[in-house]
Image (spheres, rainbow, N blue to C red):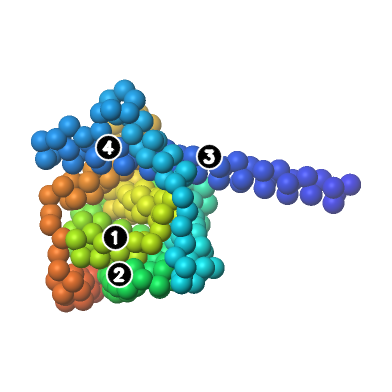
Amino acid sequence: MPDLLQQQLTWMNFAIFFAWGVVLLLVVLGFVTYAIYFERKVIGWMQLRIGPNRVGPLGLLQSVADVFKLLIKEDTIPRKAERELFILAPVITFIPAFTVVAAIPFTDRLISSDLNVGVLFYVALSGISTIGIVLGGWASNNKYALLGGMRSAAQMISYEIPLVISVVGTVMMTGSMNLRTIADLQAGGFWHWNFLPQIIGFCVFVIAAVSELNRTPFDLPEAESELVAGYHVEYSGFRFAFFMLSEYVYVFAIAGLTTTLFLGGWHAPFPFLDFIPGIIWFLLKFSSIVFFLFWLRATLPRVRVDQLMGLGWKVLLPLSLINIFVTAIYMAIAM
């Protein structure tokens, strides 16, 4: 009887985790669908254009129509491509992107996985997507795709180093890699948020995160004017959709991570506003970061490769190391 009860509890826990995973996937897919719509609208507004306005009321179904079009388009595979790796690459890119979302705490109770090493979990898994991008470029057997894949590898690996080091200062100050604990320690007003004492780390993190997302002004791996479409030039249909989906899922993840690490998570900016539910504050901060990413795309031109690599190795990396040094001195004096 105890074994039967234990088995039932195991299946019940599995069903709960599975259901939560499905809900999280639907939330992420909904975000991706309408993030694309709002990006077009925001950029259109900034460039004095109308943006999507034909499909559905106010153009709200434009992204849905685009996704449906991608799903029903013919799936082509180049004759001389490495077929198995070509098929596998989009999957390797997407799975880590969705998995890291599970570590993001939306409130103190609304969290998928309360991991003691949440920061390390995010960094470790997000790096796997680089393999999928390089693999897709190489397996396509196309020189433009290969160049895009190699560019992406150089860019993402280079900027992942200052990204990780910039977070170390926050981990040092909080004494934890648990994302919920980091957010909890920022309660009591915006003057307790980590972006103030960690302003250098915050700036380095944001710049490196934009580069990790392969978004303007660091969208060199795609670079339509130079490499046709970069590493996914040979992809079509739902496999191409997987690459695009991964990019916007990482926008979701990085916005949530930035909110948690530096902007107080679900906590209000002033104590007298604590009566407003935490999820509202989280979504407001989260949306501001997403808007900032869209704003950059409408404002800045693409940088050159040498400028990109120079910024990463000569500016961001030294700044992230200086941030750790300053944080250590501050902690030694404060203690």
- Mark 4 to mark 2 CA distance (whole Å): 30 Å
Front label number (3 vs 1): 1
Label 4, residues with CA under 10 Å away: few <14, some 14-19, many ≥20? some
Disc 1 residue type (three-letter): Ala
Q: Mark 4 or mark 2: which comes first in sequence?
A: 4
| Residues at circles 1 and 4 in contact by the CB criterion of under 8 Å | no
Q: Secondary structure at mark 1?
A: loop
The residue singled out by tag 2 in the image is 144
Which residue is found at the position 61% from the left and 46% from the top?
17
Q: Mark 2 or mark 1: which comes first in sequence?
A: 2
The disc placed on residue 114 is none
Q: Secondary structure at mark 3?
A: helix
Front label number (4 vs 2): 2
Disc 2 residue type (three-letter): Tyr
Q: Is residue 30 above or below residue 100?
A: above
Which residue is found at the position 34% from the left and 46% from the top?
265
The residue singled out by tag 3 in the image is 23
Residue 272 picture location, percent across and down = 27, 31
| Residues at circles 3 and 1 in contact by the CB criterion of under 8 Å | no
| Residues at circles 2 and 1 in contact by the CB criterion of under 8 Å | yes
The residue singled out by tag 4 in the image is 38
The residue singled out by tag 1 in the image is 229
User: Furthest residue to the right?
Assistant: 1
| Residues at circles 4 and 2 in contact by the CB criterion of under 8 Å | no
Q: Secondary structure at mark 4?
A: helix
